[in-house]
Image (cartoon, rainbow, N blue to C red):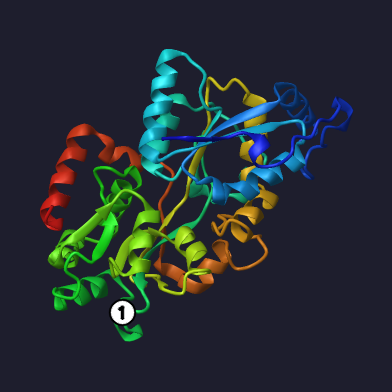
Amino acid sequence: MSNIFPLSLIAATVFVSMSAVAAPPQGYPSDYQSVIDAATKEGKVVVYSTTDIKAAGPLVKGFEATYPGIKVEYNDMNSTELYNRFISEQASGGTSGDVVWSSSMDTGLKLATDYAQEYKSPELAQLPKWAVWNNKAYGTTYEPVVFIYNKRMIPAGDVPDSHAALAKLIASQTDKFKSKVTTYDIEKSGLGFMLSVQDAKADPNYFKTLADVAKGGLAVQSSTGTMMERVSSGENLIGFNILGSYAEARAKTDPSLGIAYPKDYTLVLSRVSFISQQAQHSHAAKLWLDYVLSEKGQSILANQADIPSLRNDIEGKNDIDGLTKMLGNALKPIPVDESLLEYLQPKKRLDYIKQWRTAAGK
């Protein structure tokens, strides 16, 4: 079920006269003031997102402080719900999100191919080329996919540093790891399905590795939060294909949760965002997208929300530059391009799920 967070729940509403509207950011085109003026008349932007409100809250507050005449209506939902709801609303012609922001890169891009308006952001030059699709869909983050483990129950010397090491550890101790290994249920989680497909593309031995990882039995879940909770409590001992941004945020206050970055390859997810062709608040949507991509917005994501920036000019280590220094060539960013759509074809998707279930023993 989705959660709607109006401005009143995040920050106090500030009313300003048109004369007090913010000026364009430094370096933006001179005619950007007309976008700000039009957005202020619209008065709000509706965001459909898979990024939970706890993580997105600082970004929303920062945006509203920068553009005090514009309210943010933030709708937090899972990737499958977002996809189905947006399509249904577009078909019915009813009100819908102005901006989509999805961690499920493949379904996010699928929506963009059908419903995104073209918009060339002033931030374009600061973004990696792989993160922009036809000036319609934009990658917005740089999030390594990691292993998590229970630090109380897995010795430091046993912590795997590659996918092959993960499989070897579990296959060699099947009694210890029986039903204690967790990952996404790829049939229920769009994100989980996409990450599994990317694993298969990155590793020619993926299904054999998966079969070894599953020898003790997999406990599949539909959300990162559930997997982290189970590993922290000891109900599960280890998890794979976990969003590192959420894991790092939790590990700051959870001494039981350990994180390992695989050194053979580390997939990097970038949350896909686009502006709807039918956006009722299209100017405010442009301001929001530009703010998310800006140095200010990316700094908030990196340093307040623990979501790594896809820029390389952010203070601190939580951006492309910092992660590259840590992981180097192991980083494998998932490009925002048509290759994401291949396994969304119904037959190919069904065949892939069958192959996955066979290897996973499900």
Seen from the viewer's position, the closer of residues 113 and 302 is 302
Residue at x 67% of width, y 36% of height: 8
Place of residue 279 in the rendered image (x, y in percent of width and height, measured from the top left):
57, 22
Place of residue 51 in the rendered image (x, y in percent of width and height, measured from the top left):
50, 46
Image quarter (top left, top right, bottom left or bottom right) of the N terminus: top left
Seen from the viewer's position, the closer of residues 325 and 44 is 44
Seen from the viewer's position, the closer of residues 227 and 361 is 227
Within-10-Å neighbours for mark 1: few <14, some 14–19, many 20+: few
Extreme top residue here? Answer: 93
Q: Quadrant of residue 240?
A: bottom left
Extreme right residue here? Answer: 19
Say whether residue 85 is left or right of residue 135: left
Residue at x 38% of width, y 61% of height: 229
Kind of residue at badge 1: Ile
Image height of 216 relative to 137, above or below: below
Q: Quadrant of residue 215?
A: bottom left
Place of residue 356 in the rendered image (x, y in percent of width and height, measured from the top left):
17, 51
Say whether residue 336 is left or right of residue 58: left
Q: Which residue is mark 1?
A: 154
Residue at x 40% of width, y 55% of height: 225
Residue at x 39% of width, y 21% of height: 88
Seen from the viewer's position, the closer of residues 75 and 133 is 75
Place of residue 180 in the rendered image (x, y in percent of width and height, measured from the top left):
23, 66
Image height of 35 relative to 304, above or below: above
Q: Secondary structure at mark 1?
A: loop
Residue 125 appearing in the image: no
Residue 20 appearing in the image: yes
